[in-house]
Amino acid sequence: MLSALRHRAAELGDRAVHLRTETYRDALRQVDEPLEVCHPTSRRAREFVRGLDRVAVLPPRGFVTAQPDFVAWADERRGALRMEDFYRYARRLHDVLMDDDVPVSGRWNLDADNRQPPPKGATRLDVPDPPEIVEDDIDAQVREDLDRWAAEGIEFVGRDGPRRFPATRAEALARLRHFVDHRLALFGPYGDAMLSTDPAMAHSMLSAAFNLGLLDPMEAVRSAERAHRVDGAPLSSVEGFVRQLIGWRDFVWHLYWYFDAGYRSSNRLAANRSIPAWFADIDADAVQASCLSDVLAGVRDRGWVHHIPRLMVLGNYGLQRGWRPGELVDWFHRSFVDGYEWVMTANVVGMSQYADLGRMSTRPYAAGGAYVNRMSDYCGGCRYDPRHRLGVDACPFTAGYWAFLDRARDRLGGNVRMTRSLRQLEQIDDLPAVLAQEQARGPHAP
């Protein structure tokens, strides 16, 4: 963030007034003219700017569907809000991948054509590396400031390292071009796959660039759409990428403002355990489970892992262990380079932890070790066996899945999408032993 801010100030030259102060109010005291500010990205920041004199708040930037349009759409539903419904509305509204009023190919969602495991025996996808980020004098000054603040007692998350994400418009555009030319075609089939030696897989890694305003989501959407219509990029991949931007990203942004401030405290599955120290401190070396250890190391070393490790490893484990959703929101917010409060609130509370019992998602994203085994290369060398729920080699995800269902069965009983799983739970003869085993695991690292 600091690098992007300072690079932009340098690009603007005398068209910018770049102040370094202790607080925003200190900076405002040095400006004698009325100001405009883009709509902030958190409730606290919004209330702050609304309370300032001579500061006008402009509409949000960096999103596709306007807030009044979303509110009108959501108000009509008068109940549970679903991303798929909003996504179709947005496709029509913005004329994306449409032939007149019909979706290209006649199907709105091609996700069923995707969801493939990683290529058998592969250690990485066969795509070239993205353009390298070359640090400059501005980055050196930012690192010097960060090092000084750390020495003065400011606590930072993770390990220091080279800048891996764009901080300028030119860098972001180069990464977007690379993604469209080399990774977009594989994004569909392998968007949900994980490889321990290929953290990026087919993902664009552009979320931070969108959040910083270095790219507009619609220019990425149109670029992907053009890749399909002109260059023949697979529709399933293009549609999946478009859905992430005008569907999911906009959806969670608008839900942050549409739901009241109390939504962040939702905890309707009564998850009341605190996050253990090894997780809070991102101590990947304390963890023996291969998937969880590797994903935590990615957060520690890069501040980023793609959406499946977030949802099906980190979030899934927290859900199974009954960790407080609000603590998880805070952890994701402070640990990820793209982890803004607006992003993580609905993503963690509603989707990952199902703490709202379905206001914005149809079921808990809970899964056992079989899912991780199918979609990754983690389980082959792991000390735990994804097929076992009991014993010294019992996979904490497999055993944890059944422990979670047992704990939440009364609250999930009315969810038709959970009926089959709850019936399977009733057929497990060794369930008491599994529950005792997982209770004994407690806060210890798996």
Image: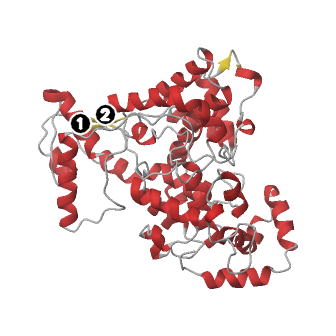
The x and y percentages for residue 200 are 50, 44
In the image, residue 311 above or below residue 243: below
In the image, residue 275 above or below residue 310: below
Query: What's under tag 1, amino acid-wise?
Result: His
- Along the viewing direction, whichever of 113 and 74 lies nearer the viewer: 113
Query: What residue did someone put label 1 on?
Result: 7
Label 1 secondary element: helix
Q: Earlier in the sequence, mark 1 or mark 2?
A: 1
Query: What's under tag 2, amino acid-wise?
Result: Thr
Label 2 secondary element: loop
Query: What residue did someone put label 2 on?
Result: 168
Q: Residue at x 64, y 50 (%)?
A: 360
Q: Is residue 113 left or right of residue 160?
A: right
Q: Local crowd at mark 1 within 10 Å, few (<14), some, or many (≥20)?
A: some
Q: Quadrant of residue 366?
A: bottom right
Give yes or no for contact between labels 1 and 2 (Cβ–Cβ under 8 Å): yes
- Farthest residue to the front: give it: 121
The x and y percentages for residue 118 are 65, 46
The x and y percentages for residue 88 are 67, 31
- Along the viewing direction, whichever of 418 and 295 lies nearer the viewer: 295
Q: Which mark is residue 388?
A: none
Q: Quadrant of residue 54?
A: top left
Q: Quadrant of residue 212?
A: top left
Query: Would you say residue 243 is visible in this rendering?
Result: no
Q: Residue at x 13, y 39 (%)?
A: 31
Query: Would you say residue 187 is visible in this rendering?
Result: yes
Q: Local crowd at mark 2 within 10 Å, few (<14), some, or many (≥20)?
A: many
Q: Residue at x 45, y 37 (%)?
A: 129
